[in-house]
Amino acid sequence: MEREIKTTKDGSKTLYIKSLDESYHSVHGAFQEAEHVFIKNGINIINKNEINILELGFGTGLNVLVTINEYLKTNKYHVINYFSLEKYPISDTESSNLEYASLFSEQNLSEIEQKIHSVPWENLVEIVPNFYLKKIKCDFFDILNLELPPIDLVYFDCFGARVQPDLWEKPLLEMVCNKMSNNGLFTTYSSKGSVRRILEELDMKVEKKPGPPGKREMINAWKTNNFS
């Protein structure tokens, strides 16, 4: 897929696929979207010392970087195990040209950003003390065969349903929910009614939350003890 770099409204960059007319992150603000969906409405509301995170998909690596930033900034979590799936990894040139480390004023994340992209796929690697990342190159539907620990937090960051509708339908959503721990949280930028209804069918407790810039709402869903 041919990709180009575009600057979003908050000054952060995203990749854009012209043939699909689809961006990896919101054109209203890539950085603001990642912080709002996956930090404010994701990891910040998980009350566990050790957290297993599953991301679909790795993409530009921005969600990993904002999570590491939060981990280093707050000292709230003892251990984070982060599993990220991606079928089409971006190039080293693309990742360096996105310049995401420059978005963080609290600390210098340049070396960490480089490490995130350079570590081997399929290996669990300690990025910073007690933050472990495993990038897995696979189709999302291969999740059924992956050996993962019970997942406490899902970052569901697939391309939109307009270009990849099958990623927002019951087969994949059910596979993901089956990998989650009881009281685990599923968070996504999407607010589609069909997604909400599928999650409810799977006995997830769905909450509509205010969305990031450019979106009125987003979805959080908690796995209940009734799910099987």
Image (cartoon, rainbow, N blue to C red):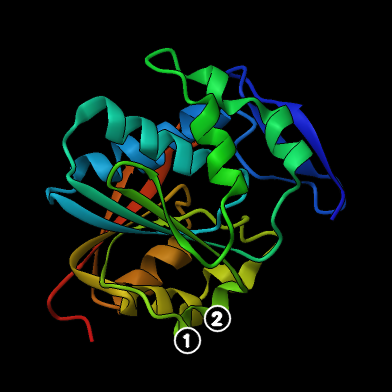
Q: How many marks?
A: 2
Crowd band around label 1 with a 10 angstrom C-alpha radius: few (<14), some (14–19), many (20+): few
Query: How many angstroms separate mark 1 from mark 2 (CA)?
Result: 6 Å
Relative depth, front residue between 111 and 210: 111
Task: Name the secondary structure under disc 1.
Answer: helix
Residue linked to disc 2: 142
- Give amino acid for label 1: Asn
Residue 61 visible here: no
Crowd band around label 2 with a 10 angstrom C-alpha radius: few (<14), some (14–19), many (20+): few
* Residue at 62% over, 50% down: 59
Q: Position of residue 183 (x, y in %)?
A: 16, 64
Residue linked to disc 1: 145
Relative depth, front residue between 98 and 192: 98
Asked whether the residues under the numbered discs 1 and 2 touch, taking CB atoms below 8 Å apart as contact, a structural biologist would say: yes
- The answer to which image quadrant residue 95 occupies is top right
- Give amino acid for label 2: Asp
The answer to whether residue 38 is left or right of residue 224 is right
